[in-house]
Image (cartoon, rainbow, N blue to C red):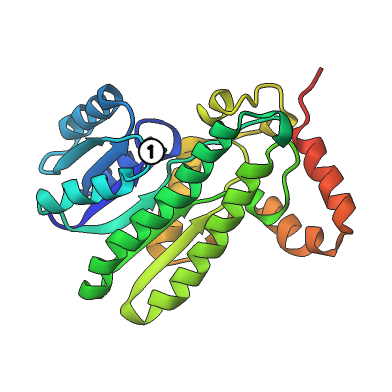
Amino acid sequence: MKHAALITGASNGIGLELARIHAKRGGNLVLVARSQDKLNQLADELRAQYDGIQITVIAQDLTMPQAAQSVFAQTEQLGIQVDILINNAGFGGHGRFFERELAKEQQMIQLNITALTELTHLYLQGMVARCRGKILNVSSTASFMPGPLQAVYYATKAYVTSFSQAVAEEVREFGITATALCPGAVATDFVAAGDLQGVGAWKNAKSAQSVAEYGYRAMEKGELVAFNEGKLKFALEWVIPLLPRKTVLKMSRMAMEKSK
């Protein structure tokens, strides 16, 4: 299988919509997520809609150590050439850091940072050898400030945005691009999984489909950092950096407070 896009977190939300977009363009897919049933359902849907595309399903829990290496080993064994890597899998969690379960925070770091880094390193080797490839890392507007009540999640996304840009510069000479997609609130299962029901920031959440379409286009153009909301981009790039740090922290916390 050649010219395939590997998408993590492909069973729902932004990842699922990215898979639909890529399939519509006639691209082959490697779908990665924990749920075998959901992945098979999506694969069947896309095969029925688009003739000729090849889809491989890999059920893998990327919060587990060695999971990224397992995914890579399976694609290598199948002879799949991954030319587009989309690191979409990730989760958050609401609450004060000292009150949250440490194991959950460690899983978040493993998925949001470690697995993403490992997959990027593993698949980038082939991209560099071929002088062709694209990487899309789904980050967040949360990456531009500290996040009280989501301290670890915001910090992991800061890593993703920084890492993506640095890698993009390193591989630019090989014709490879890396894009950090930084959406604001998105209406997905992320809200329930992260215990974010009632948080004001999600009152005007964008659809997963619209975010995926914006991100895919940005990846195609090789943009470094892609914001799907113009007002948020302006605030994060031109307003927030000028404010006192304590003011930013208060604003960030207020955005994550739950309505009573």
Left or right of 76? Residue 71 is: right
Q: Residue at x 32, y 45 (%)?
A: 66
Residue 229 in picture, x, y percent from top left: 63, 49
Let me know if residue 224 appears in the view.
no
Which image quarter is the C terminus in?
A: top right
Residue type (three-letter) at the residue carrying disc 1? Met
Query: For this view, does 104 lie left or right of residue 61?
Result: right
Tell me the residue at 26%/43% (across/down): 24
The answer to whether 54 is drawn above or below residue 216 in the figure is above
For the point 25% across and 45% down, the residue is: 71
- Taking 144 as reference, is 133 left or right? left
Q: Position of residue 31 (x, y in %)?
A: 27, 39
Is residue 138 visible in the rendered structure shown here?
yes
Q: Nearer the viewer, residue 187 or 150?
A: 150
Which residue of the protein is positioned furthest toward the bottom in this rendering?
Answer: 173
Please tell me whether mark 1 sits on a helix, a strand or a loop: loop
Residue assigned mark 1 = 64
Residue 256 spot, x, y in % from top left = 74, 34
Q: Position of residue 102 (x, y in %)?
A: 60, 34
Looking at the rendered structure, the number of numbered marks drawn on it comes to 1
The picture quadrant where one finds residue 51 is top left
Q: Out of 237 and 49, give the one closest to the viewer.
A: 237
* Residue located at (27% from left, 51% from top): 5
Q: How many other residues sit within 10 Å of disc 1, few (<14), some (14-19) or many (≥20)?
A: few
In this image, 96 relative to 157: left or right? right
